[in-house]
Amino acid sequence: TEFMAVHEELAAARIQLEQAARLTELGTLSAMLAHQLNQPLTVIQVLLQSSLSGKEARKLPAPVAQNLRDSIAAVGKADDIVRRFRHMVRAPGREGLETVDVKQIAALSVEILRQGMQKLRLEFVIADSSGPFLARASEGDLEQVFFSLIQNAQQAGGGQARTIRITLASDDRDIIICFADTCGGIDPEHEDRIFEPFFTTKPPGKGTGLGLSLVRQIVSRWRGEVSLENHPGRGATFTVTIPRA
């Protein structure tokens, strides 16, 4: 029995070391990717801006000009995503935090994702009116939290008609965001591993296993918490708690 216990501890330690090595490799690849993408993104942005600032720009039809402005904004977001992904694997800190309106970001994220999710009905509910819901966080990272948890529910739903109800509430100290879905829940044998980096139940090539791990890392950077209430066969509720500004 003692031998088996030691064997299991060694096996768990080996898995942790392998995950740490893969995260280190991911950090290196992220830095390289960010470096390689920086130049073409900058060139695209400069060329788009030039198209809008020249004399010929006045002759552009209004829809074309608007498309160019939207493209510039999209390139800026792409650059921001690359930069944030590069920093994601660093040790958690509090750099880059700002005062953000959680309600506004939640509503925008739901509206964006609702358009592309035909089988997943999204509901956004304000549980109380004690706002404003201001937190010390990062706007881009908070959007990533919403996107990851909503898409996680969608993928768990398997393409069937499901519902995810997002509830926003607050108390004297924290802002509480609940993501409650009817997407079947999590297999009990996987429940303890869902936040592990690279753990996924999806077929090869269908998932990286980083979504929930990054959500926890982001929220921890804000001194917040992520918890799970699992109902196998019915659904799951992820609760994100972050300090108020």
Image (cartoon, helix red, strand yellow):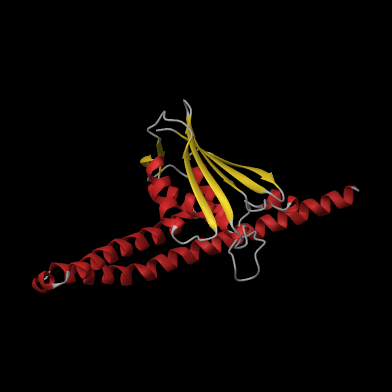
2 vs 61, nearest the viewer:
61
Q: Quadrant of residue 75?
A: bottom left
Instruction: Please indicate whether residue 2 sits to the left or right of residue 192 in the image.
Output: right
- What residue do we see at 63% from left, 53% from top? 183
Screen quadrant of the C terminus = top left
Q: Position of residue 163 (x, y in %)?
A: 57, 51
Q: Position of residue 11 (x, y in %)?
A: 76, 56
Asked if residue 127 can be seen in this view, the reply is: yes
Q: Position of residue 198 (x, y in %)?
A: 62, 60
Q: Quadrant of residue 16?
A: bottom right
Extreme residue toward the right, this view = 1
Query: Relative to 83, is 227 above or below?
Result: above
Instruction: Please indicate whether residue 115 sits to the left or right of residue 236 in the image.
Output: left
Q: Position of residue 98 (x, y in %)?
A: 36, 41
- What residue do we see at 13% from left, 71% from top? 57
- What residue do we see at 36% from left, 58% from top? 80
Asked if residue 92 can be seen in this view, the reply is: no
56 vs 243, nearest the viewer:
56
Number of marks present in the image shown: 0
Query: Relative to 95, is 206 above or below?
Result: below
Query: Relative to 121, is 39 above or below?
Result: below
